[in-house]
Image (cartoon, grey):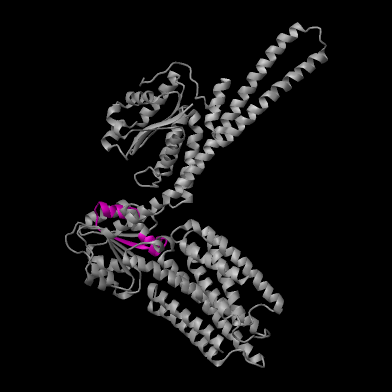
């Protein structure tokens, strides 16, 4: 089943990129990705039934749920969004497919958590936070691509397919605010989970890195508000900051 | 009854000849009135724009008849336009109209005006009651035009300098409502760009010109404010979009001026358009501030060319729509015709049966009413059974669009295709201005 999902997600991702050049193929990207989502949902239900728990107890299984959320967001952009926000799927689906491939390779890594107390809430909040910060980074990536075309005065696909620069800049900041808010709540819930269970689920490295990541996002907003950071510097910064989030996940894997 | 179109367009006929061959609205109305008064069994729609003059005709007229009509009403000699003249019949005529309505045959592919012009031409003919059997063809053409513009990107992306300036600004800022635009200059290009900014929702528009009176005059025309030339730096500092279109031989915005103007907010996104030749904005201004874009005339022209290429790429998709709708048109016309043909065939058979039955019953007056009813029923069943196979074949041919077999059947049974008959009028042909 996972091989089928892989094939469908990769095909959907390739078609979504091709959609920048031929928008009509986006409907086939939707079809492939929807089919992949269906089979991945079936896979997640199967895992949940066999383990008797929501499949977020290892980093590998959480990764699978995270990919599921990314794919749902990409399909929502394709189905619901009119015009230029559809192009977001051309970034989200390849990222989702990449996460899926990485997730397949680490499905068995990481220790298994016991879901109790504050831990399920922490995982839920952290998932929302990572999704928000990912969307912020994707908006930043879209911004830099379109800005590059405009600066080089060589308008190509991104000029035609992506939203206006300032709209992407605004949405990037909004998603970052959304993500940071949930990140801070997740930190709080994580702290409570640490204090209420006998065996702490997170290593000190993860905790310190999480706080550092949050501090960096606070710095990003401080620069936006106090120094007027907009556009390219802000877009590059949210992309770099998302690497900190990924490092956080890596630290979880190693812990 | 064949449909045909005869015309000339910008593709192969120069403007001077297009002018001579065009119909004024008054001429079109007069020509339609003459058709009505003359009782000519012809349906016609005349489409006459600055880029084309076309006569869509349904009826028995030949090419020579149509050209004579055209010559008589416009005075153009057919020899003058013969090089660029085109003549399409039946499916090709319908396909041509669909292409015209979709904007594929326009000078600027996908331009929106032609759809309104096709609609106007059709409505004018309809009001004059000369559109007749061309009704369905034009209705479908309007549908094709709408589909082409809503389902494809053929009408997207600006293809004129003024529009592209606004489009570029929109690609950076999104909606321009609430943005501040500064236009430097008061000439024709400055006015054009100002009007485009206004039309795209810019509420805060400022005109700055060396000769203040000219700036004020333009500002009054486009609804803008017109500060003094000495305020240029402060106005630049406040503006999101700056368009410079002057005839100055020197730089109007140099690096120093830009640095002083943008110093307070180096991170702000600004778009500067230099629409002057020679250039009025120093290229180095693009490096003042982190988010400053400077586009000169060549850069804007490059975007125009790119947008035109994008539209051309969409022409394939529009072509698919045209073929789809052409198929629907042929099927619907086939269904309409075959209904009339079948009715005609059945009426003819029924008339023969009744005539023979009446003649026979006159000789068989000893039969009872029951026997007469039985014979009547038997002959009716006999006729129906004989006609059953031909009717089924006619329906099948119509469904498959097999016009040749349908035509053979019409010939075989000597039937008239009621649905294709042009509007019948009372008097004889009148093929000249009244």
- Who's the residue at 40% across and 44% down the image? B103
| Residue appearing at x 70%, y 79% in the figure | A51
Q: Position of residue B192 (x, y in %)?
A: 30, 52
Q: Is residue B181 magenta?
A: yes
Screen quadrant of the C terminus of chain B: top left
Residue B262 in magenta stretch: no
Give the left or right position of residue B181, taking residue A82 as reference.
left
Q: Is residue A102 or residue A70 the one in the foreground?
A: A102
Indicate left or right for B300 with B360 as reference.
left
Between A194 and A10, the residue placed more toward the observer is A10
Q: Residue furthest left?
A: B249
Where are the magenta residues, as a range? Answer: B168-196
Q: Nearer the viewer, residue B161 or B51?
A: B51
| Residue B289 visible | yes
Residue B154 in sight in this render: no
Q: Is residue B233 above or below residue B326?
A: below
Residue A9, placed above or below residue A122:
above
Residue B337 spot, x, y in % from top left: 56, 29
Percent x, y for residue A104? 57, 77
- Quadrant location of residue B223? bottom left
Quarter holding residue A155: bottom left
On screen, B367 above or below A65?
above
The total number of labels drawn is: 0
Give the residue drawn at x 46%, y 34%.
Answer: B123
Question: Height in image: B148 above or below A110?
Answer: above
Relative image position of residue A112 (x, y in whole percent): 64, 85
Q: Quadrant of residue A79?
A: bottom right
Residue B102 as seen in the image, left or right of residue B23: right
């Amino acid at each position: 089943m996972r091989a089928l999902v892989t094939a469908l997600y990769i095909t959907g991702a390739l078609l979504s990129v091709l959609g920048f050049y031929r928008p009509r193929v986006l409907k086939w990207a939707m079809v492939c990705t929807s089919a992949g989502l269906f089979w991945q949902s079936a896979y997640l239900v199967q895992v949940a039934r066999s383990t008797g728990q929501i499949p977020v107890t290892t980093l590998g299984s959480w990764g699978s749920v995270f990919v599921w959320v990314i794919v749902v967001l990409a399909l929502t952009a394709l189905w619901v969004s009119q015009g230029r926000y559809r192009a977001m799927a051309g970034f989200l689906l390849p990222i989702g497919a990449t996460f899926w491939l990485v997730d397949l390779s680490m499905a068995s890594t990481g220790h298994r958590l016991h879901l109790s107390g504050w831990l399920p809430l922490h995982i839920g909040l952290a998932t929302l936070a990572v999704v928000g910060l990912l969307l912020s980074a994707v908006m930043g990536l879209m911004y830099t691509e379109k800005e590059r075309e405009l600066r080089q005065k060589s308008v190509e696909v991104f000029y035609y397919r992506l939203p206006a620069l300032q709209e992407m800049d605004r949405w990037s900041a909004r998603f970052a605010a959304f993500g940071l808010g949930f990140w801070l709540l997740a930190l709080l819930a994580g702290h409570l989970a640490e204090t209420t269970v006998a065996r702490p689920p997170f290593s000190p490295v993860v905790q310190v890195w999480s706080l550092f990541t949050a501090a960096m996002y606070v710095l990003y907003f401080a620069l936006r508000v106090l120094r007027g950071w907009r556009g390219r510097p802000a877009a590059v910064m949210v992309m770099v900051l998302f690497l900190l989030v990924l490092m956080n996940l890596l630290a979880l894997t190693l812990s | 009854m064949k449909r045909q179109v005869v015309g000339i367009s910008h593709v192969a006929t120069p403007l001077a000849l297009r002018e001579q061959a065009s119909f004024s609205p008054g001429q079109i109305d007069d020509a339609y009135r003459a058709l009505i008064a003359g009782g000519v069994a012809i349906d016609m729609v005349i489409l006459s724009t600055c880029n084309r003059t076309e006569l869509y005709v349904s009826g028995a007229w030949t090419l020579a008849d149509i050209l004579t009509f055209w010559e008589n009403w416009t005075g153009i000699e057919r020899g003058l336009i013969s090089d660029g003249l085109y003549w399409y019949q039946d499916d090709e005529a319908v396909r041509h109209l669909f292409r015209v309505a979709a904007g594929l045959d326009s000078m600027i592919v996908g331009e929106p005006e032609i759809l309104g012009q096709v609609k106007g031409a059709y409505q004018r003919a309809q009001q004059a009651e000369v559109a007749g059997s061309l009704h369905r063809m034009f209705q479908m053409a309007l549908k094709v035009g709408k589909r082409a513009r809503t389902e494809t990107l053929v009408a997207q992306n600006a293809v004129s300098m003024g529009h592209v300036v606004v489009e570029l600004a929109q690609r950076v800022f999104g909606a321009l409502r609430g943005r501040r635009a500064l236009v430097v200059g008061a000439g024709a290009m400055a006015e054009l760009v100002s009007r485009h900014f206004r039309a795209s929702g810019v509420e805060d528009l400022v005109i700055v010109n060396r000769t203040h009176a000219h700036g004020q005059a333009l500002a009054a025309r486009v609804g803008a404010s017109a500060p003094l030339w000495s305020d240029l730096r402060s106005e630049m500092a406040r503006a999101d979009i700056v368009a410079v279109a002057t005839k100055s031989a020197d730089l109007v915005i140099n690096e120093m001026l830009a640095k002083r103007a943008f110093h307070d907010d180096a991170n702000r996104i600004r778009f500067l358009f230099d629409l002057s030749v020679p250039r009025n904005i120093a290229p180095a201004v693009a490096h003042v501030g982190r988010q400053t874009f400077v586009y000169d005339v060549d850069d804007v022209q490059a975007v125009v060319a790119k947008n035109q290429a994008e539209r051309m790429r969409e022409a394939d998709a529009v072509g698919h729509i045209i073929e789809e709708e052409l198929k629907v048109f042929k099927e619907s016309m086939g269904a309409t015709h075959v209904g009339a043909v079948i009715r005609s065939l059945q009426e003819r058979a029924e008339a023969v049966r009744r005539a023979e039955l009446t003649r026979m019953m006159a000789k068989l007056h000893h039969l009872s009413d029951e026997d007469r009813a039985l014979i009547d029923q038997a002959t009716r069943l006999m006729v129906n059974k004989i006609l059953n196979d031909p009717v089924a074949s006619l329906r099948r041919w119509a469904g498959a669009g097999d016009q040749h077999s349908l035509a053979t059947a019409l010939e075989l049974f000597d039937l008239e295709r009621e649905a294709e008959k042009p509007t019948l009028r009372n008097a004889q042909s009148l093929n000249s201005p009244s």
